[in-house]
Amino acid sequence: MNRLLLRTAGLLALLLSAATTAMADTRPNILFCLADDWGGGPHAGVLGDPVLKTPTFDRLARDGVVFPYTYVPAPSCTPCRGGILTGQMPHRLEDGGNLWSRLPAKFQCYPDLLEQAGYVIGLERKGWGPGTLADTGRTRNPAGPSAKNFEAFLKTVPDDKPFCFWAGSSDPHRGYAKGSGIAAGMNPDDIDMPAWLPDTPEVRSDILDYYFEVQRFDREIGERIALLEKTGKLANTLVIMTGDHGMPFPRGKCNLDDSGARVPFVVIWPSKMQGGRVVDDFISFTDIAPTILQAAG
């Protein structure tokens, strides 16, 4: 009798295990990595910058797809981020088309839709904004609920659930620690100076301070990629790494020019996408939300 019970219990465990595997959610995880004021030029090693060291972006470029002609819908934080989250052009978002504004709840955001579909969602640091939730009908940032950090967030995600996480850095937004780029060992003489900026020692040093924070952002995203590898989640994670508009210099952010509206952009999804490619198609940040939703089914 005991042997029969043991065999029955063992069979039941096998059936439950098989059923759990069959019901496992195979939809991709989403990791969206957004720098603040990173863009307006080929500001990554793999894109041809002679000074910047961006091993994380470069690795994603080797393993994924680079889109060199990626443009933001508006070269300013709040309207750009509203466009990312809603898939709408900022002029359709009423107040949300402005800096320091509000994004009414009637404009659906992809993290909310994914949460309704069973995803665990989270936000680290800067999501939608700057702005206010007052009189919007929202109780949290449109990019999701805040988490202490990515590692803490991953511990809250059940094994049978996909996640959607917004990793929002404040780098390389001003202000800078003056001289941080030179102190980090970068040579101001090596900069490929933008033609529209005065070529002076002060400006070259300021650009290196910007580069210092770009490299810090790249390093922090590398740490998040390492966590995905450690937890075995990278293969089925769609990772996007980009910046929200041009660098914080004259003719950069807030200017409707390549130097204000064109940004680095790379995507990987190791289990689904062939890597090592460059796609020269024009893409807009308003493509991000519908693409993520389509990938998630």
Image (cartoon, rainbow, N blue to C red):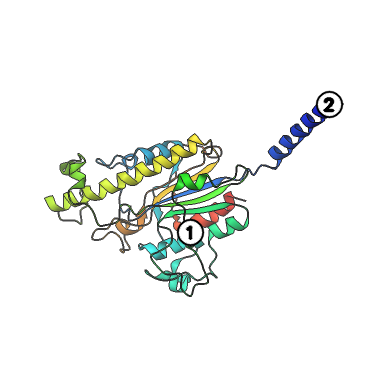
Real-space CA distance between mark 2 and mark 1, rounded to the nearest whole angstrom: 55 Å
**In the displayed structure, would residue 117 be above or below residue 279?**
below
Q: Position of residue 126 (x, y in %)?
A: 40, 57
Residue 80 picture quarter: bottom left
Under circle 2, the secondary element is: helix
* Badge 2 amino acid: Asn
Q: Is residue 251 visible?
A: yes
Furthest residue in direction left, as rendered: 201
Q: Residues within 10 Å of mark 2 (few under 14, many from 20)?
A: few
The residue at 40%/68% (across/down) is 131
Foreground residue among 268 and 126: 126
Which of disc 1 and disc 2 is earlier in sequence? 2
Foreground residue among 79 and 251: 79
The residue at 53%/72% (across/down) is 137
Mark nearest the camera among 2 and 1 is 2
Q: Residues within 10 Å of mark 1 (few under 14, many from 20)?
A: many
Q: Position of residue 242 (x, y in %)?
A: 40, 50
Q: Which disc number belongs to residue 2?
A: 2
- Quadrant where the N terminus lies? top right
Q: Is residue 87 visible?
A: no
Q: Which disc number belongs to residue 297?
A: none
Foreground residue among 96 and 66: 96
In the displayed structure, does residue 10 sit left or right of residue 166? right
* Badge 1 amino acid: Ala
Q: Which disc number belongs to residue 143?
A: 1
